[in-house]
Image: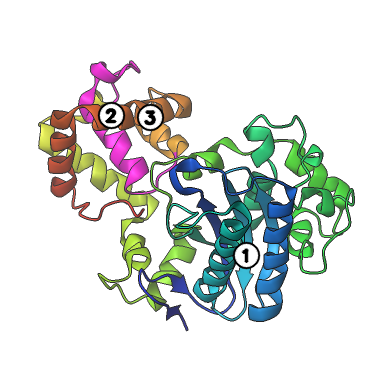
Amino acid sequence: MLFFMSRPLRIQYPGAWYHVMNRGLNRRRIFHNDTHRQQFLILLADIHHRYGIEVHAYCLMNNHYHLLLHTPQANLSRAMRHLDGVYTQKFNHDTKRDGALFRGRYKAILIEAENYMLQLSRYIHLNPVSAKICAYPCAYKWSSYSAYINRAKKPTWLYRDECLLRCSEHLSIKMYQKYVEHGNDAEFIEKLSKAYWPSVLGTQEWIKQIKKFCKINSEIPASKDLTRWKPLEDIDVLIQKVINHYGLNMDFLKKRGNRYAENKPRNFLIYLAMEYCGYESKKIADKLETINANSVRQIKMTMQKKLKNDKFIAAELNLLKEVCGLIHQPHN
């Protein structure tokens, strides 16, 4: 059974897994020194003992944090309210300031653990490397990675066996270290690099199961966001609607060339397929045949820039969204 907590409501149910992140207001620092970071870790231990939250990975950056959490009791909202609220009080007291510390409520992606837990733990542990703070994740003190590979003492509240087991049935630390230091998967990074994070991350079959338990409600942004996910075969329907709208044929969409100005209908199609339907760049490239996944990603990023600066392009996209039946905005 799923539970929906106070507004804006989250998808919550016993045993759910989440990737949780929050950032400082106006991207300001939320950790000024090691004392602040230690206080945050103490609060992670606190939500484990108070609410039974399982912390499976964490990384504390200067102006944001990442967590991989498991909630046996369907109480993410309550635990995060305690974590962010109490930390803000302590931070404000230490720095003699008041007001909001974070830019808003935390972001939480409901994830299918079987397919995405391991990749998320790697993504979290590689955050300092991606930010060019260090060359290797083990060199960063304020993540759970060193505890994973026995370079630091493992806190009693840190759970690592689930991730280790998905990497190796023998819970091999060396295998996990090799997996993390191999680097992030490009397709996975693409899912988290959108302007709007998805509310759910899983296979289409898993998402269908989640939707069976979710009553779509306009007051529940996260559950409404589930309606944006389409079975992969429906990309043909999206393609046909774009073709019909512009009075074109498939050959035009497959026309070679990567630059934005060369094929506007194709570029709109790519943007809608990725941002509103959750399709991966490789799948779109396979359909279009004449461009590769890297070109698809580049076109999507170019479209994002155009939409911010060109009101006519934005208006045309909104019209096409209506034609294609994509009425829900990306969840923020």
Q: How is the image coloured?
A: rainbow
User: What secondary structure is found at the residue carrying circle 1?
Assistant: strand
Stretch in magenta: 254-280
Q: Nearer the viewer, mark 3 or mark 2?
A: 3
Residue receiving disc 1? 69
Q: Check residue 278 for magenta coloring.
A: yes
How many numbered marks have been drawn onto this rendered protein structure?
Answer: 3
- Measuring 64% from the left and 49% from the top, which residue is drawn there? 119
Mark positioned earlier in the residue sequence (1 or 3): 1
Local packing at callout 2 (Cα closer than 10 Å; few below 14, some 14-19, many 20+) is many
Residue receiving disc 3? 301
Q: Nearer the viewer, residue 321 or 169?
A: 321
Mark positioned earlier in the residue sequence (3 or 2): 2
Q: Nearer the viewer, residue 251 or 179?
A: 179
Residue 296 in percent (x, y) is at 40, 29
Q: Nearer the viewer, residue 124 or 323?
A: 124
Circle 1: residue type: Leu
Q: Quadrant of residue 47?
A: bottom right
Circle 3: residue type: Met
In three-dimensional space, the C-alpha distance between marks 1 and 2, rounded to whole angstroms, equals: 37 Å
Residue receiving disc 2? 267
User: What secondary structure is found at the residue carrying circle 3?
Assistant: helix
Residue 151's disc is none
In three-dimensional space, the C-alpha distance between marks 1 and 3, rounded to whole angstroms, equals: 30 Å
Q: Quadrant of residue 117?
A: bottom right
Mark positioned earlier in the residue sequence (1 or 2): 1
Local packing at callout 3 (Cα closer than 10 Å; few below 14, some 14-19, many 20+) is some
Circle 2: residue type: Asn
